[in-house]
Amino acid sequence: MRQSIYIIMDNYPVARDVYRLRLDGPTDALTHAGQFANIRIDGMYLRRPFSIVDWDSGGFVILYKIVGEGTRKLSNIPIGRTLDVMLGLGNGFDMTVSRAPLLIGGGVGVPPLYALAKRFAVNNITPTALLGFASKYDIILADELRGLGCKVIVTLETDGQRVTDRLDEAAADRDFYYACGPEGMLRAVKRQCPLPGQLSLETRMACGVGLCRGCTRETLAGGKRICVDGPVFNKEALAW
Amino acid sequence: MVSAADLSAAVGAVRLANPVMPASGTFGFGAEAARLYDITKLGGVVMKGVTTLPRLGNPLPRVTDCPAGMLNAVGLENPGIDNALKNELPALASMYNGPIIANVCGFTVDEYAALAARFDESDAVAALEINISCPNVSHGGMAFGTDCRAAADVTRAVRRSSRKPVWIKLSPNVTDIAQIARACEAEGADALCLINTLLGMRIDLRTRRPILGNTFGGLSGPCALPVAIRMVWQVYEAVTIPIVGMGGIASARDVMEMALAGASAVEIGTAGLVDPTALIDIIDELPGVISSMGYNSYAALVGAAH
């Protein structure tokens, strides 16, 4: 974990209510795709946790959806201003267990899967991505994943389709899945997909570093903190 | 050259190198904090509240916020007394040499007494903080801290079952905190800790449902400071035993204000959840702030506003 001051380089909308934010500053604390940042926003008391969509030696990027007061305030902060960030939180995905990964994302659960796909691509492993969105106006990162060479399947609720409707087809030649999205989607994926897998969970958090136990949820191995024991859990650990 | 102000503090027989302790529930059992900062600089530490049996706590979400504070409804998640004594306490004692305060929460008077007796087994425990003020459990907790007679019953039972100093942690969710304080003092409490969190709630405009899984939660953070200062002041006027002040402290100046109201030492919780080095930064700033006020010791400030 590193707490530091980062400068806003980009903060603009990329889909309906979804913004792309690039913050420049030290990224040495980021070691795994699937880790998150806990960001202080002026006017909100608690930091807000966001998954990382991409990073390099000079900074990192998040995609966030405006869902409340905190994210609305964040969307109004101009380029050039600074933010206090705790970076490199959480365990992240385990990339060593798959040679043919399937990425399953729903809505703003897709960003950490892009970070994962990019790092797989470096190792000449090309994931398949199965992405679900509410409508065509909500699609994020599909083109970017295609740009990495991924086979991308998109389902839209406006078409009456969910990711689970295309799961068999997407999983056909895959050996492991990585999933992030709404809990209802994650539960359905865990029930239906026979592959081994890892799922990234989310909840409201306070400290993000394991002090307050504000994010503990029950697993088959007892209460686990999403911030430090997760956010990524093996599917066998979840009591769904 | 002017010598640096003396930070040493005392809560009855418990001596602290400085007045700053992490509040129970914001420090776990020390392992996570030790990865973030040098915990040996803390004046004392207060462990996560311990119950007889392990507790998973409340359903998510357990936290939310407001412009100057947060609500929590963790619900006393803890590994239980056996695990705390066997694993957590020795691990903490191996990292930290100063006073360790064990926070105890029961659901009956007998359970409080039994837990206090169990902590008597450990030389590593300097004092007991008896939590009769947790707002996030359905029985016990705050029920004992909002009634003079129940508070007195718990204090008497714990006093009889333990030789350790007994600190009673009071709830602000009462009509007259001075009355409760006097009841605890009369039954032999060695110190009073206040305030625990203020009962509150928030509602999500999108779902039109309470945000917290437990519906209600405890409000803490800077918005609680004026309430805490007022109650420490009232209790200082009502009793002669020492007070550990807490509630919204976020700076060295807040610590000074708490001392002037009557706090022999302080606990800081929520500030450390937003800024992980807050407690250490405050300890580092204290000597300068004390000197700038014209004092040469923390102890000289305690109760000086009365």
Image: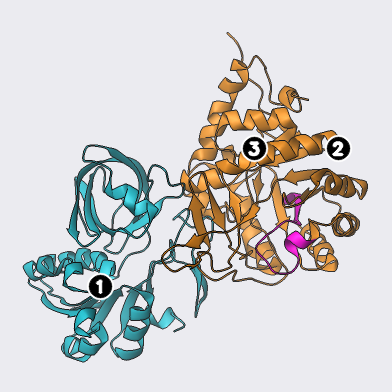
Classify mark 3: residues with Cα within 10 Å, few (<14), some (14-19) or many (20+).
Answer: some
Tell me which chain the residue with mark 2 is part of: B
At x 54%, y 29%, the residue is B284
Chain in orange colour: B
Residue under numbered circle 3: B226
In the displayed structure, B41 sits above or below A225; it is: above
x, y percentage for residue B150? Answer: 86, 60
Residue under numbered circle 1: A96
Q: Are marks 1 and 3 in contact (CB under 8 Å)?
A: no
At x 75%, y 23%, the residue is B304
| Inter-mark Cα distance, 2 to 1 | 64 Å
| Inter-mark Cα distance, 2 to 3 | 19 Å
In the displayed structure, A110 sits above or below A12; it is: below
Q: Left or right: B4 with respect to B167?
A: left
Q: Left or right: A49 with respect to B68?
A: left
- Answer with mark 2 or mark 3, whichever residue precedes in sequence: 3
x, y percentage for residue B91? Answer: 60, 56
> Residue B121: which quarter of the image?
bottom right
Is B249 or B210 nearer to us in this picture? B210
Residue under numbered circle 2: B238
Q: Are marks 2 and 1 on the same chain?
A: no
Q: Amino acid at mark 2?
A: Ala
Residue A161 visible at all: yes
Q: Amino acid at mark 3?
A: Pro
Is A65 or B79 nearer to us in this picture? A65
Q: How many marks?
A: 3
